[in-house]
């Protein structure tokens, strides 16, 4: 259990991996002390840097382990300035009362536009034509070059990115198929496939947009590439560990696949300028990009604003709206009140116990909201401005209390 009073010293923020300046400016405008680093940190480096840090901001490369969280008792929240959160031990964070926020929508359009650009480039063999021209070879030939109109695309993973790609692809004249393990509503004239094999057999273009859950590791390999249609195109803009890169190279070299575009890799360099190695290097019909699907100025600015605001509202108001690991709630604070945030074990009777403590000290509750998620419950209570200090001691000493914070 952690009993925490309101923050008297400045809130210390650590932003890694080139978080957009708009997020830094937002935090500093609130009086927070912000330190920035332009690269990812390994576990030992992260543990050393987290000493005294209240808010951590990362992107996709920094791994936030249970050990790192255990070594950071002052850490209140983590902002993942990206879509994925599989680089963070969410369970350990929740058990430590550390809220985690991400940006599930902000870079969707940027990823989709990159996918569309790569589909057109590969279908028209632009990468090979471009390489030839730079080598001084004039190869004016239509062989193997096609329009995308009238062809078929198979979208594996029909979430925020997959659905928006579905709409744009249909507008380009593509026949859209999709496969998702969840029950998803088909948009426009898209057709759902009952199995991945069905999608592979129907699609001229296969593009992956799955999440980073452990079960997706290595799910697309030799068998799946072999099932793809001859001369089809493959894209992966999801997670690097979901595909077998050696198998992909084999099917590109033997001509079974006509091209591929890959933006994510099992092992990625920590910093700009570091050497990149991959089995896919050197192939003229492959587009390799350094995990830039969401790396547009528009997307990064939107992400910076969105996640920074979530972090600030959690520190100041206790709001957990769209948190990926804590119960999600938000409460407009009543005037002339103190706000107490209680994270607790999700068992019956906690609300009654809390209100009994308030009532025992004749303290009126002006506003209150409770939400639960799995093994945890989260309660915000706005109480009268004058209350005895014994209330906090009693709340902190409840057997169900995980973390207690006084926000105002």
Image (cartoon, grey):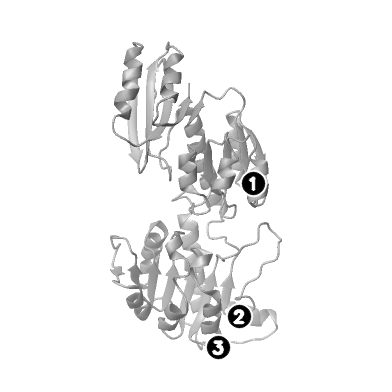
Q: Nearer the viewer, mark 2 or mark 3?
A: 2
Give the number of the disc on residue 295: none
Find the residue positioned furthest to the front: 399
> Horizontal and vertical percent for residue 271?
68, 56
User: Residue at image x 60%, y 47%?
Assistant: 19
- Tell me which residue sits at (53%, 88%) in the image: 254
Q: Nearer the viewer, mark 1 or mark 2?
A: 1
Label 3 and label 1: CA atoms lie apart by 53 Å
Q: Could you say which is closer to the camera, residue 230 or residue 299?
A: 230
Is 153 placed above or below 86 here?
A: below
Q: Nearer the viewer, residue 234 or 210?
A: 210
- What x and y, as percent, mark residue 16? 63, 47
Residue 356: where, in percent of width, then height?
31, 19
The front one of 157 and 149 is 157
The residue carrying mark 2 is 284
Q: Residues within 10 Å of mark 3 (few under 14, many from 20)?
A: few
Query: Is residue 36 visible to us here?
Result: no
* Residue 95, image x, y percentages: 46, 40
Residue at position x 59%, y 81% in the image = 128
- Residue 161 visible: yes
Mark 3, residue position: 141
What is the secondary structure assignment of the residue under circle 2? loop
Crowding at dot 2, Cα within 10 Å, few <14 / some 14-19 / many 20+, comes out as some
Residue 290, image quadrant: bottom right
Q: Residue 46 — which label?
A: 1
Q: Earlier in the sequence, mark 3 or mark 1?
A: 1
């Amino acid at each position: 259990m952690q009993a925490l009073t309101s923050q008297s010293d400045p809130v210390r923020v650590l932003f890694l991996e080139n978080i957009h300046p708009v997020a830094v400016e937002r935090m500093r405008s609130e009086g927070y002390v912000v330190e920035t680093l332009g690269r990812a940190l390994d576990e030992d480096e992260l543990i050393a840097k987290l000493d005294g840090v209240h808010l951590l901001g990362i992107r996709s490369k920094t791994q936030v382990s249970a050990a790192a969280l255990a070594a950071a008792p002052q850490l209140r929240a983590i902002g993942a300035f990206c879509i994925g959160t599989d680089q963070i031990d969410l369970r350990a964070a929740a058990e430590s009362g550390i809220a985690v926020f991400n940006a599930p929508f902000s870079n969707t359009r940027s990823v989709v536009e990159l996918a569309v650009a790569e589909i057109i480039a590969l279908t028209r063999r632009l990468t090979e034509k471009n390489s030839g021209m730079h080598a001084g070879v004039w190869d004016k030939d239509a062989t193997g070059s096609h329009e995308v109109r009238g062809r078929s695309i198979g979208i594996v993973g029909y979430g925020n990115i997959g659905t928006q790609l579905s709409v744009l692809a249909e507008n380009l004249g593509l026949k859209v198929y999709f496969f998702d393990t969840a029950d998803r509503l088909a948009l426009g004239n898209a057709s759902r496939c009952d199995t991945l094999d069905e999608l592979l057999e129907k699609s001229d273009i296969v593009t992956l947009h799955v999440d980073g859950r452990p079960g997706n590791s290595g799910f697309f390999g030799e068998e799946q590439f072999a099932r793809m249609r001859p001369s089809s195109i493959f894209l992966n803009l999801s997670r690097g560990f979901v595909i077998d890169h050696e198998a992909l190279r084999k099917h590109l070299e033997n001509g079974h696949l006509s091209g591929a575009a890959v933006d994510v890799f099992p092992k990625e360099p920590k910093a700009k300028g570091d050497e990149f190695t991959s089995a896919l290097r050197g192939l003229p019909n492959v587009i390799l990009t350094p995990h830039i699907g969401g790396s547009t100025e528009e997307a990064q600015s939107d992400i910076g604003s969105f996640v920074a605001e979530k972090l600030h509202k959690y520190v100041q108001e206790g709001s957990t709206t769209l948190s990926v690991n804590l119960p999600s709630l938000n409460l407009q604070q009543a005037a002339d009140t103190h706000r107490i945030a209680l994270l607790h074990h999700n068992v019956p009777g906690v609300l009654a116990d809390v209100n009994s403590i308030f009532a025992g000290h004749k303290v009126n509750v002006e506003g209150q909201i409770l939400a639960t998620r799995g093994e945890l419950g989260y309660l915000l209570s706005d109480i009268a401005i004058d209350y005895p200090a014994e209330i906090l001691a009693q709340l902190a000493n409840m057997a169900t209390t995980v973390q207690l914070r006084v926000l105002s």
